[in-house]
Image (cartoon, grey):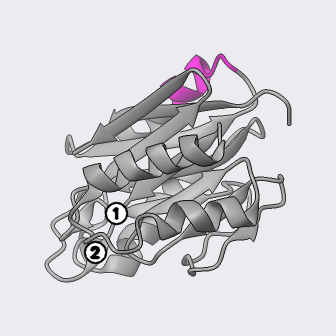
Amino acid sequence: MNNLYPFVLEVFTMLNDKILITGISTESNNNLYFNNLINKFKNWKLPESAKNEAFLIDYYLSKELTEDTPKKILALGASFKADLRKGCSGGIIGDPHSESRSINEKAEKLTNGLVLMGFPGGPGIVIRGTIQEAEVIMLSVSTFKKKEDTKMMEVISQTAEEIGVSYLIAVSDGSGYTDGSVLSISPNETNVLSF
């Protein structure tokens, strides 16, 4: 896993809802994959029955996002804004080639060697680093209110730089009482997208 290429991307659904996507690839040129995502989501809409159900928002987003993901994509995350009246949802992150599940608060090594950690309600991160480094980064934002997405992403970025983590993606929930953001960090570039 020598060369990694984190990315961020904005796509729009059939109903013109915005989805923020972040990921880590083993290849620098991902234009074909990006075009596939753009075209896939042009024809997608969240089922009406899922619009006010936190679990179902994440389930349908994950199902659509990870379907047919190329092997070169090692980690993937997304934030989606839906009109959720209670709680927060619309944020997913992890290994797109593993079974989707709810995140717990423990850092874990993914099968591809990256490390995943997150809090229910966000944020969630995937890094090239150690479990301890993931814990330090998440501890740095553990006292933030979920509504402070932009500030959380700034602190995640600063903390990663301070401890020498060069590759990272992060996601916060986009639905409910959160604003929704995605972040990607590489040695040469930091990108943040927010709603």
Query: Which type of secondary structure does the marked residue at label 1 adopt?
Result: loop
* Residue on which disc 1 sits: 173
Residue type for callout 2? Cys
Residue 93 spot, x, y in % from top left? 54, 59
Residue type for callout 1? Asp
Which quarter of the rendering shows the N terminus? top right
Instruction: Say which residue appears at 42% left-offset and 68% top-offset.
Output: 58
Closer to the camera, 50 or 135?
A: 135
Closer to the camera, 27 or 115?
A: 115
Q: Residues within 10 Å of mark 1 (few under 14, many from 20)?
A: many
Which quarter of the rendering shows the C terminus? top left
Closer to the camera, 70 or 173?
A: 173
Magenta range: 28-36
* Residue on which disc 2 sits: 88
Query: Which type of secondary structure does the marked residue at label 2 adopt?
Result: strand
Instruction: Say which residue appears at 34% left-offset and 74% top-offset.
Output: 143
Cβ–Cβ under 8 Å for marks 1 and 2: yes
